[in-house]
Image (cartoon, grey):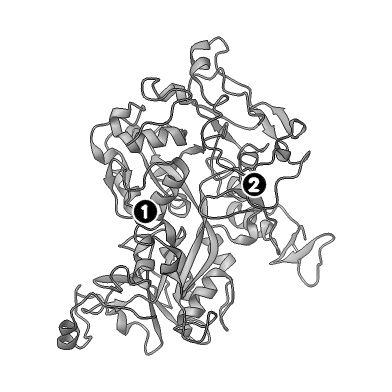
Amino acid sequence: MQRSSILPCVTALVLGGATFPALADTPNCADIAGGAPIVYGSGGSSQRDLIGKAAVELENSDHPIYVVYQDSGGACAGITALTALGPTAITGTAYYWPADTGTKTSCNLSFSGDEVQFAVMGVSPLQCPLITDESLVEGIHDLSGPISAYVPIVPLGSTQQSISAAAFYLVYGLGPVAGIAPWTNADASYLQRRDENSAAQIVFSAATGLPVNKYQGTDAGSNTAMVTNLTALTDPEAGLGFVSTDVADVNRDKVHTLAWRQTGQDVARWPDSSSTTFDKANVRDGAYHLWNSIHFFGLGGAGGPDSWDNPEVQALVEYLAGASTPAGVEKSIDSIAIANHNIPVCAMHVAREGDLGPEYAAPPEAPCDCLFDYATSGTATCDTCDDANPCAAGTCRAGFCEAY
Amino acid sequence: MPRMTLSLFLAGTVLCLVGCKDVAEPTDTASAAADTAAADTSGGDTDTADTGEDTATECWTERDEGTCYDSTLCELPTTAPSDSLVFLNQCSDAAYALFDDSARIPETTWKEGDALPAI
């Protein structure tokens, strides 16, 4: 695929691709791998930690691949880079995860920028402002992987428990003048929002009908910043925001989720079976509306529709999507997704067409319900098994007797 | 489509766990009139291919939280497109919260049957 750079050629010629020490004591991204291949990506902040956990596995595989990921541009930044409809390179700083510690660490990108090779986002490309036609993503592999759910959140001190799609529409569409108590504070910082490139905001717009670029409030810039900003409010009762559940779940000491009542739904549901559990029961059986598959993208190659432009990108994207597992990788993407508070496809019992489209029952081919419930609750709800202790009924998978 | 009849008496958001009783005041008819939860036939259901099979009355059961789609009595749709409301309103043992729009949304801003205001 032909791609264009927005940076003046003279810049690249003068600098010769040299890295620039943008932050003291911060390594250059180009130097993190000890000679192993590095792939550069861009996309949503919701998926950053999932990428990081997968990156550590690939770095320790038989053929190590290092991953550099930038999430500051929002979900759509990655796919617009791959389509060359926006900047094709990322600049400044990005994240990587050292193979020995797995700790999220900043590194300096090259001064002239590093070409985006893969993209990640929580919705399909057509939800992005610049992706106006399917033909614009031709030649780009789009693989779906684990599930992300999205939740309204309020500061921990708030007494609110639920919100409806109609109330969300009015609060974010009209702001405090809508008079939807308690979200009536005139200070815009009490309504934390994102922008039209955010998967979370796109999801809430799809659910409510509120135009994605018409949100009142303050742009937090990222999922984690939204949590931080809500925590700082002096009147917790008046604060409102929204994030993906993987971010909300690890911040339950700062914010709590609101149950969501979709239009046409008669009670509000949490994504989990209660406000204090992590089982995603209502997502997995379709009773909670705000969920979507995570999409992973990489450029196709010149060898036909199944070819890839870069084999390392193919390995990463296929691993993230559960399509293949590179040699030497110990953890499946299912177990990584569970650890990241996402939902692997093997624990889902519904599927949907399109972003927040109609649901239908879709039992998993090889269920991992027992594993998921154990991992998220700490309590085994199924019999355990191994080669010496086979299941009396069902199929032994990952040490648990699954239903089939 | 059969729809839940719950929350007619609710005057606010009521947190409710499995098996709990309706704790709202049964005499609160003002909010009952304004509550759009049970009578909203205009919004949200955009499933154009709903054949009606999955909404047969025998599929719906009265529970503490109202009428819900009982997937032990009738199969949930297994192909797309389908009526997502049978999933969203399916009977469940999970905890839930009841939200009464009328408690928070003034009728001057939005009332039953009206389209949401344009932005």
Quadrant of res A347:
bottom right
Kindly tell me whether residue A44 is visible in this rendering: yes
Residue at figure coordinates x 69%, y 28% from the top left: B63
Measured as percent of width and height from the top left, residue A141 is found at 49, 73
- Which amino acid does the dot numbered 2 rest on? Ser
Measured as percent of width and height from the top left, residue A175 is found at 30, 34
Name above or below for residue A226 compared with residue A138: above
Measured as percent of width and height from the top left, residue A203 is found at 44, 49
Q: Disc 1 designates what residue?
A: A223
Front residue of A92 and B31: B31
Residue A272 left/right relative to A150: right
Q: Quadrant of the C terminus of chain A?
A: bottom right
Inter-mark Cα distance, 1 to 2: 32 Å
Residue A209 left/right relative to A106: right
**Secondary element at tag 2:** loop
Q: Quadrant of the N terminus of chain A?
A: bottom left
Callouts 1 and 2 in the same chain: no
Name above or below for residue A307 compared with residue A268: below
Residue at figure coordinates x 60%, y 57% from the top left: A375
Quadrant of res A390:
bottom right
Front residue of A129 and A219: A129
| Few, some or many residues within 10 Å of mark 1 (<14, 14–19, 20+) | many
The numbered mark at residue B82 is 2
Mark 1 belongs to chain: A
Please name which of the two marks, 1 or 2, marks the residue nearer to the observer: 2
Measured as percent of width and height from the top left, residue A197 is found at 34, 56
Quadrant of res A115:
bottom left
Kindly tell me whether residue A239 is visible in this rendering: no
**Secondary element at tag 1:** helix
Furthest toward the top, the residue is B27
Mark 2 belongs to chain: B
